[in-house]
Amino acid sequence: MTEFDAVVVGAGPNGLAAGIELQRNGLSVLILEANDTVGGSARTEELTLPGFRHDVGSAVYPLGIGSPYFSSLPLRDHGLEWVHPPVPLAHPLDGDRAVLLNRSLDTTAQALGDDEDRYRRLVSPFVERWPEFAKHVLDTPLRPPRSPLLMALFGLRAMTPTTRLARRFSTEGARALLAGNAAHAGVPLERALPSAVGVTLMAAGHAVGWPVPRGGAGELTRALASLFASLGGTLETGVRIGSLDELPRNRAVLLALTYRQVAEVAGQRLPVRYTSALRGWKYGPGAFKVDWALDGPIPWAAGGVDQAATVHVGGTIEEIAEAERAPWQGVVAERPFVLLAQPSLFDTTRAPPGQHTAWAYCHVPNGWDGDATDRIEAQIERFAPGFSQRILARSTHGPRELQAWNANLMGGDVNGGALTLDQALGPARWTRHPWSTPVQDLYVCSASAPPGGGVHGMSGYHAAREALRRTFGRT
């Protein structure tokens, strides 16, 4: 068999990032992907009707454009074009009202009325120093930061439960805006850490925006794969790996697999205690996702919502907190918090002329086999009366279907593991170099490793840098 310096298992954003970083440092790299196409959860397919292109997994990328690694790569030369909607994010409220997260921090803050100054104090430090903040927040929390005061300020926000952090606001809109962003964490808002996600996403909206790739999510990973190939890398699809023994000869292996999968593939080479920690890794709530082909744009009742590619559909902070608590209790909220994307409003390649696509999901118990379609559509109808009449066709993916589509989405968890304090600082990550394993030449580069979920490629980049240092003796 051909020998490579490094083999990467998994060709999603993290695996591709790892392969690129190794290859551009002069190594010979093979990337193996189980599916027939690259991309992991960043793929685009015709799910409903001909001509309607849907992002089956992720869709909108504030951390993609804001990633210190992706932004350093010549992805535009490989066909990637970011499309920025006029408004990064909208959050409709009852009574034909909406709160908008604009690119301008001033515009957003001023629209919050009495909460203008409070909102500025919450996010402005991280907006103003976004490049250094992004480098720190997309690292491991155990690595000493070069900007300790900035990250100490962030840490105070991160460790404060969102329901408590929101008490600084007096307006319903400001509280809802924070809660909707924090709910991306998939963790009850009464716990620590969702606020870290909320503040980061809001800061990213002002600093770099919430764009979509023209042509679909798959164009981001296609550009990454094209760059990897241009550097001389080798990529093979349709190759499913059940054991490290199935790999060609190599000096280092990087696994873009969640921790439990790493234990299954590499357990025989790992110390028993470490393998036990990996097998004890807990996954968070699953996602129930619906894609629609529409005969027109979603008829939002509130002005400005049609200017955003991303819409948080869930009402007040109290409603969102209740909805995000439900999956952890083994149920689905009657009024779930719905994350919705409407990219065809700004990217005409997604649907036939005059028609549109939309995408939405809510959190459900991990592995849940029910159907949340009616609840999701009822929430959208609540803020967009007449939405149901626009539907030409729909496609649904519950947790089991999502895992079948991408094996890393264990039980439908899109973040690679539950974002809980015991896991963020638990035995699998309790090290300044959590991408390494006790085996000298074996590394983990999936969303299970820091900095966790999101399409940013930083887990892959960090794992590649660890391999370059530890296995290949390069700084």
Image: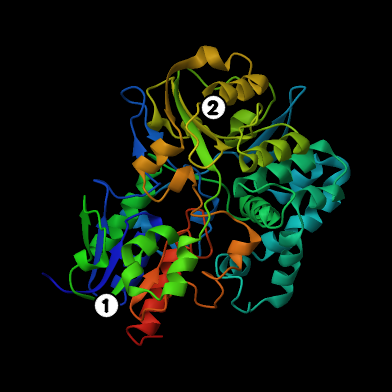
Residue 83 on image: x %, y %: 48, 43
Residue 378 against residue 147 in the figure, above or below:
above
Q: What residue is rendered at 60% in x and 56% in y?
A: 419
Residue 392 on image: x %, y %: 43, 16
Q: What residue is rendered at 34% in x and 22% in y?
A: 49
Q: Nearer the viewer, residue 455 or 265?
A: 265
User: Which marked residue is nearer to the observer: mark 2 or mark 1?
Assistant: 2
**Helix, strand or loop under label 1:** loop
Q: Nearer the viewer, residue 232 or 104?
A: 232
Residue 370 on image: x %, y %: 50, 28
Residue under pointer 1: 26
Number of labels in the image equals 2
Residue 78 on image: x %, y %: 31, 54
Q: Nearer the viewer, residue 235 or 110?
A: 235
Residue under pointer 2: 372
**Viewport quadrant of the C terminus:** bottom left
Q: Amino acid at mark 1?
A: Gly
Alpha-carbon neighbours of circle 2 within 10 Å: few (<14), some, or many (≥20)?
A: many
